Amino acid sequence: MLGKLLSREECAECRLCCCFDSYDLWETPVINRATHDAILEKFKPDQDFLELEGYYLLKMQKEPDRDLYYCSLLDHGRGCIMGKEKPFDCRIWPLRVMDLKGTRVIVLSPVCPLVQTRPLCEIQAVAKELAPEIFRYARENPAAVKKYISGYPIMLTEE
Ligand code: SF4
Ligand code: SF4
């Protein structure tokens, strides 16, 4: 979550971006090698992963009675056990980086209910501030870039 737009208290009441149904499992964070190693060394030594061409997805357990998967790094009382070291996808959420016909764009996920209540100019200002870091990460970690999904509002286009 973006601390400049959303407070820890607001997110603690929500947690929507740390749980997934089978339809949106594709939204789980794409984890690079450095973050994979940090998870095993510092946060959850028994974490299992799915490996995908040098990147990793967290293995999550389905809730027994419903189509729901809580992130395996979520502590229901304290939040993400990785704190400020959480995966890049999660640090910039609800912003996402996507590929629109060969051009990288920063988009706003329509899934986050609270960010929709913030003024658009404030969201765009945060996207602009983070753009150099986001596009650098995207260049170095192409697996983090999703194909553009129609309807996701574009906040910024890479120059
Ligand atoms: S979906 Fe939005 S409001 Fe909810 S926890 Fe995630 S960032 Fe916070
Ligand atoms: S890694 Fe942390 S912030 Fe990201 S989905 Fe899991 S619990 Fe949420």
Image (cartoon, helix red, strand yellow):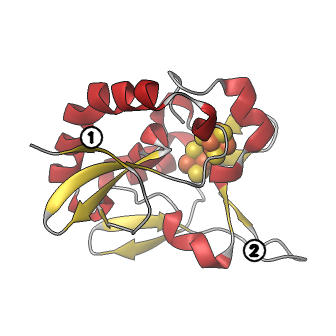
Is 120 rendered above or below residue 14?
A: above
Q: Is residue 87 left or right of residue 98?
A: right
* Residue at mark 1: 134
Nearer the viewer's eye, disc 1 or disc 2? 1
Mark 2 residue element: loop
- Quadrant of picture, ligand 1: top right
Q: In this view, does 13 lie to the left or right of 115?
A: right
Residue pictured at 65% horizontal, 68% vertical: 60
Q: Residue furthest left?
A: 159
Q: How crowded is mark 2: few (under 14 residues within 10 Å), some or many (20 or more)?
A: some
Mark 1 residue element: helix
- Residue 33 horizontal/vertical position (percent): 31, 55
Question: Where the N terminus falls, by quadrant?
Answer: top right
- Residue 91 horizontal/vertical position (percent): 46, 38
Viewer-closest of 51 and 37: 51
- Residue 78 horizontal/vertical position (percent): 75, 33
Viewer-closest of 93 and 140: 93
Q: Residue 62 carries which label?
A: 2
- The image quarter containing residue 110 is bottom right
Q: In this view, does 77 lie to the left or right of 15?
A: right
- The image quarter containing residue 98 is bottom left
State whether residue 90 appears in this view: yes
State whether residue 72 appears in this view: no
Q: Which amino acid lies under the numbered mark 2 shown in the image of this protein?
A: Lys
Residue pictured at 25% horizontal, 35% vertical: 131
